[in-house]
Image (cartoon, rainbow, N blue to C red):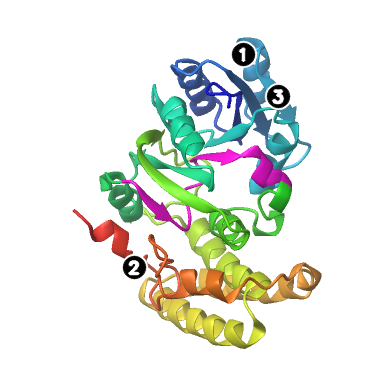
Amino acid sequence: MNENPLVTVNILSFNRKDELRNTLIKVYEQDYKNIEVIVVDNASGDGSAEMVKKEFPEVQLIQLEKNIGIAGWNEGFKAAKGEYVLVLDDDSYPTGSTISVGIEKIIDNPNVAIIACKIVSNSGYKRDNELAKIDFENFVNSFTGCGAIIRKNVLEKIGGFEKELFIYFHEVEFSIRVIDAGWNILFCPTSIVIHNFSIANRQVDSNLVDCRKVFFDVRNLILIIYLHFPLTKSIFLIVRIILGRILYGFLEKKLNIVLSALKSAFSRMRAIKSQRKTISDYTRKQYLNGSFAGGFFFFNSNYGLRRPKWMKQN
């Protein structure tokens, strides 16, 4: 077994030139040197692509003609030559030993498809702050998209991120397919990615709530349930989500965003009907009752995340 395999660093970029420059510098400061770096630029208009060409000529740059959201990572997956792929946002970067630690873990665990890195963020989001406090290794059932190591052969078998989601919750949908295919996801607290949180391209209000995230979280959660859960189960879950999100929208003065998200979700259901692939009862239960360590914490009735059991350990 090759203990020093080629790793593809797959960075998705959109209008964050300075943040992208910093991420690329940090990637090359890694102690793990057997890497190739791909930047997929989602039709940035701030000179990001030109900066990469001029300052990092060794980087493989894929320039898209329009912003296709998280599906841009799929273009990097297609071009990747590495046995493993580290996915990063343009405003997230690995610490010095992130790749070497993550690769050691994934090699030692042949049934693990994804190493979920520990995300340390400078944002004020409660979820980011809680995740940064976890310091024990555990199997989980999702990961944070701005920092994770994925086996390339898993991508080849189950496909990349679901393009219909555009942004947010793509990690959950991908994780559902990973676990349904019999793989595991391992949270590795010593493989650290810094999320240098940038408000560029976000619609952040005075309470540090990203209004765009509110929209896509509601919309995409409904679409994920429709894509992968039996219709008899989907109806109950979707009704529960609708009621919870409408209540949240009313209380937090974001009802118009929630209603727009619900309208968008239902308008897309017919278009994605042919993509429906029901997951096994085993997989479904991992996301509903939290029996899989890491528990799925998105089906509660309020908008915020319910703290999963594995976070409560000391």
Residue for badge 1:
56
**Depth check: 44 or 105 in front?**
105
Q: Quadrant of the N terminus?
A: top right
SS at mark 1? loop
**Mark 3 touching mark 2, by CB under 8 A?**
no
In three-dimensional space, the C-alpha distance between marks 1 and 2, rounded to whole angstroms, equals 42 Å
User: Residue at label 2?
Assistant: 306
Q: Is residue 115 left or right of residue 78?
A: left
State the residue at coordinates (48%, 84%). Answer: 240
Residue 47 is at least partly visible in this image = no
| Residue 274, x across and y down, in percent | 81, 70
Per the rendered image, the range of residues in magenta is 137-156
Q: Amino acid at mark 1?
A: Phe
* Res 281 quadrant in image: bottom right
Above or below, 278 relative to 308: below
- Amino acid at the residue labelled 2: Arg
User: In the image, residue 167 lies at what x, y percent?
Assistant: 59, 53
- Residue 49 percent across, percent down from the top left: 67, 24
* Amino acid found under the numbered disc labelled 3: Leu
Q: Residue at x 72, y 49 (%)?
A: 157
Q: Which residue is mark 3?
A: 61
Q: Position of residue 262 (x, y in %)?
A: 60, 75
